[in-house]
Image: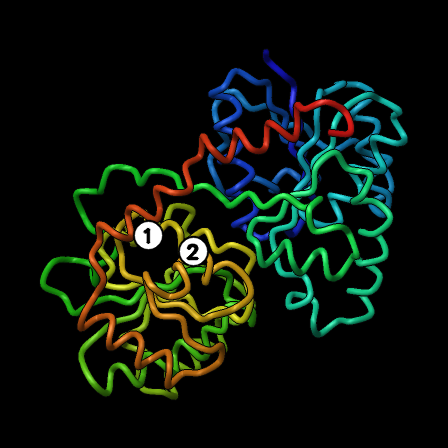
Amino acid sequence: MSAHIACFLLQNQAPGVVRVLLNLTAGFLARGHRMDLIEESPDAYAAFPIPEGARRVPLPEGDPRAPGKRLARYLEEARPSAVLAAGHPANAAAVRARALSALPLRVVVTTHVTLSAFMRHNPIQLARMTREMRQTYPQADGIVAVSRGVADDLAALTGIARERIHTIHNPALPPPAPLSAPPHPWLAAGEPPVLLASGRLAPQKDFLTLLDAFARVRNQRPARLIVLGEGPERERLLGVAARLGVAQHAAFPGFVPDPYPYLRRAALFVLSSIHEGFPNVLLEALACGVPVVSTDCPSGPRELLREGRLGPLVPVRNAEALAAAILSTLESPPPAEALLRRAGDFPLDAACGQYLALLLGPPGG
């Protein structure tokens, strides 16, 4: 039976969260459901293509400090069957909006980051967020975390019973057909191996340690580094690359909405993050059969890489260990078949089915 589902996020969500929401939207549309994408600003989904058939709906105007009231006005007008909220504070706003509208719709809230790590430098704000989550999340019809580590962290922070929190991993989409030409000259045949990294150029991704590790790799063998992404640390990273003597071997092309053309031709994907939730790009690398090296950060890489059996896990902020893992993986990469099989454990259809069971199940179920 067709349902009307609204996806809701607020400004400043990480691109990875937006991509997951749009991937799920495409999956729900394929099953015949009507989809509204509620956007606080016109650029909320601008970085990625919108699935055909989805309706973009501006969040009604009003006090920016009260998104729940603004969302309640949309609910009263559009009357969707369910709301899928992405991240805090959108989650709390969705719960409050339902209460204000008094409509019999379902609300599912999702957590995409390991909050205790994400907010470790702002304990006052974390305490405020935790209080708000304790007040609102138990009222939702479903609470979803994108990895077991994120679920464990959310339960520990809020006191919500762990069994109430569902783990639904982000799905792996099949890579598109390869491009005939490489997206960057360094990725052409016959060039030195390229290490690929991707993410917002911000402290969380710790590209400073990656540059240090890359310089150590360059001391041992030829290699190049491409980092996809944009963010506040760009100038600092460029300066560090110059200081380390690797500026001419490291490229920062900016934000790329589709990393697959780069992944297909990279020799290795490196995740250097201090913390994650469930890193989409690591899963995308596996879907391309590309060897990976990752920090053993909370949360997601250990689950994805089967405790390190599919790729080395190294301590965070340890350039020496990261360089050693890169060198050993370049020398002896794992079989691509094993990586592809692991990516196959996360199909879009299965993720959609798990979400729809929460979004369309019986009230209170």
Quadrant placement of the C terminus: top right
Q: Amino acid at mark 2?
A: Leu
Quadrant placement of the N terminus: top right
Q: Amino acid at mark 1?
A: Leu
Q: Are marks 1 and 2 in contact (CB under 8 Å)?
A: yes
Q: Residues within 10 Å of mark 2 (few under 14, many from 20)?
A: many
Comparing 158 with 321, the one in front is 158
Comparing 285 with 219, the one in front is 285
Left or right: where 33 falls relative to 327: right
Q: Residue at x 40, y 56 (%)?
A: 282
Give the number of the disc on residue 65: none
Residue 194 drawn above or below residue 59: below
Query: Where's residue 172, x and y in %?
Result: 40, 42
Q: Residues within 10 Å of mark 1 (few under 14, many from 20)?
A: many
Comparing 49 with 209, the one in front is 209
Query: Where's residue 206, x and y in %?
Result: 49, 73
Dot 1 falls on a residue whose secondary structure is helix
Dot 2 falls on a residue whose secondary structure is helix
Between circles 1 and 2, the one closer to the viewer is 2
Give the number of the disc on residue 304: 2
Query: Where's residue 340, x and y in %?
Result: 28, 47
Left or right: where 269 falls relative to 330: right
N-terminal-most mark, 1 or 2: 1
Q: Residue at x 36, y 81 (%)?
A: 213
Between marks 1 and 2, how big is the CA–CA gap? Answer: 9 Å
Residue 42 drawn above or below residue 211: above
Residue 145 drawn above or below residue 273: above
Q: Residue at x 46, y 51 (%)?
A: 280
Name the residue beneath numbered marker 1. Answer: 286
